[in-house]
Image: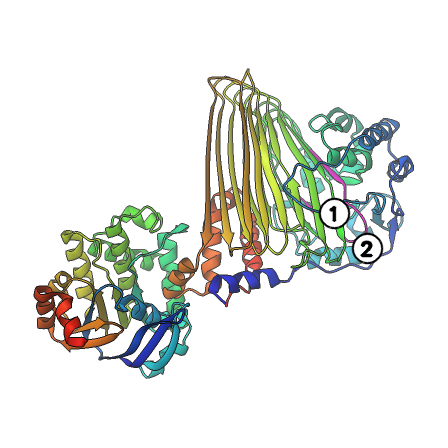
Amino acid sequence: MSATENTVTKLVQKEYEHGFVTELETDTLPPGLSEETVRQISARKNEPEWLLEARLKAYRHWLKMTDPEWAHVKHPKIDYQAISYYSAPKKRGDGPKSLDEVDPELIAAYNKLGIPLEEQKALAGVAVDAVFDSVSIATTFREPLAKAGVIFCSFSEAVQEYPELVRQHLGSVVPYTDNYFACLNAAVFSDGTFVYIPKGVRCPMELSTYFRINEANTGQFERTLIVAEEGSHVSYLEGCTAPKRDENQLHAAVVELVAMTDAKIKYSTVQNWYPGDAEGRGGIYNFVTKRGDCRGQRSHISWTQVETGSAITWKYPSCILRGDDSVGEFYSVAVTRGSQQADTGTKMIHMGRNTKSTIVAKGISAGLGENTYRGLVRMTPKAENARNHTQCDSLLIGDRCAAHTFPYIEVKNPSAKVEHEATTSKIGDDQLFYCRQRGLSEESAVSLIVNGFCKEVFKELPLEFAMEAQKLLDLTLEGAVG
Amino acid sequence: MLSIKNLQVSIEEKAILKGLNLEIGAGEVHAIMGPNGSGKSTLSQVLAGREGYRVTGGEVRYEGQDLLSMETEVRAHAGIFLGMQYPVELPGVNNLTFMRESLNAVRRARGESELDAPSFLRRVREQAKRVDLDQALLKRSVNQGFSGGEKKRNEILQMAMLEPKLAILDETDSGLDIDALRIVAGGVNELRSPDRSIIVITHYQRLLDYIEPDRVHVLVGGRIVRSGDKQLALELEQRGYGWIEEVAA
């Protein structure tokens, strides 16, 4: 067996770290989807009439839509009637949520994931919203944030406490008609995170949401809405894990970002959903719609994602560059190994003058992994002097994986400039031999080459998480020693 | 230091080395010369532990140990360095980071402490100056976009950093102009010491004008057919390999 084959075998065999299940009493809706399901979800959350109406409208529209088939991924047809659309750990008593009322099993589960919810143990400077199956179970550091005027809470709470803000912005970036999964989400979304940064405020801490799927046969449909008012700044990070199961589970989230004049939103994702086993059994279908709207002049939205998990990833975090001089960025590392498939990329829609976008997409495939970059750069007729630079690199490990690139470029303004660079490379036996001849183990050699490949993206992550991401990637590569 | 007895190696059923014998003592510099396809590169690759070669007979002892049973990186830790004929590129891997990781891996394996960043940098800058390698190349990706001469100088630089006990230089002179050749040879000569052995594999005699070998061996058809002192190299230069091949046949 050659060194590379050996590495690939080990990569494929690597165990998923977060595959445990937490035993809990839950309130779970039986599988199935109907208007009644939508009403039940809305009732459990005690939602205002307008929101129920919006959900029903979305549901009725969804019935008329069909599964998208254009993505470069293969999976059996999803039976939407076999999924439970709501599952929540049973609450202990009523009243306002404080950490004392959270089931210790849940806190233990998050501790096990390395996300302590007790504030004194938490990573300094990072506030966490913990979403477990369909509900948010705790949100840390709310008081210091409130002092700065920042709202950071679960989506359900936001609906109760700040209904006007939610109503004003919900669906304003991703309308329910946008696509099949976004429409489904608009009908059945259960919880998620709401962030509001008032005018001129620089959010004093990193905000983050940690998503955990626990219950079997459920889907997770969360909704994240971040609104940054004029001149404000916020950096937000999400992390995701799920137990090992033989069945596929659906995760169809929607994230909407609104950046007003001179506002800056930095949104980072470290996605490590259960990827399924080497034969492709089980794993999460991660079908997510993420979009940011640069509404004012000099608005700035930056997406950074490190995607190592999920059986299938289907997501295109995008920017609508509406305001003049606004800036959109997309930095991505997507790893597929075993039988994982990823079809991911971005859309940069240039509408304002002098708008600028940067795309850096790095795909790594090993084993039987399929990795696709799909991106759209659109320069509309009003996008005077707009600029885009796209760099799209693929790294192959072994010879049974694949990398594909589908860049779409539409230019309707002659003053616009679009640049696209792409490379494909392979970790070869000769590279591994070279490194080992200089004393490095095969594992360090692969790690060095892969980290070198991802460097440009990692440097965009908040410092604490850049380390995390590198560790995650090293874990993914653990056992590469022949 | 190195003792090769009756070494037989094939690639995909084709015999390349057919009973090669070679003894190299500490502090000696040996040159191995020979025509294309005689097995020179196979010998260097097998000594360094490249996969894909099948040893069908014989043995190799390095400092008394069975070399062929050691993993590639373990050989490196034990002081074997192969200066490659075609150094590979490592896109995205910073040259300095690579050298530091490499040096520290070797030091750890030898039970030595890792070199801290300032001492490492001082040493690498010093050595880079000696082989006349542009300091800017230290910050680039390993060998990426380097000229042929720069790649070879980068190899010599790594050799100087790692301070091997047995350095094998596989056609380090190929593709070098005379100035580069002089610099590379200078780097090798500086490393000559009583406890370090060097094998210089080359096609041409001209490198041996700058690196004076203790012994010269002629490899033809997978065997060493003649050994001698540096006079042998000069004789080859005048008469070509044909003469030796005839004698050997």
The residue stretch that appears in magenta: A209-225
Q: Which residue is mark 2?
A: A103
Q: Which label sits on residue B162?
A: none
Comparing labels 1 and 2, the label whose residue is closer to the camera: 1
**Which residue type carries mark 1?**
Pro
Residue A78 seen in the current view: yes
Check contact, mark 1 vs mark 2: CB within 8 A.
Answer: no
Q: Position of residue A128 (x, y in %)?
A: 68, 46
Q: Which one is earlier in the sequence, the residue at label 1 or at label 2? A: 1
Q: Position of residue A231 (x, y in %)?
A: 58, 26
Query: Callout 2 environment at 10 Å: few (<14), some (14 to 19), or many (20+)?
Result: some
> Magenta includes A267?
no
In three-dimensional space, the C-alpha distance between marks 1 and 2, rounded to whole angstroms, equals 37 Å
Element on which disc 2 rests:
loop
Residue A462 seen in the current view: no
Q: Residue furthest top?
A: A382
Left or right of A40, for residue A136: left
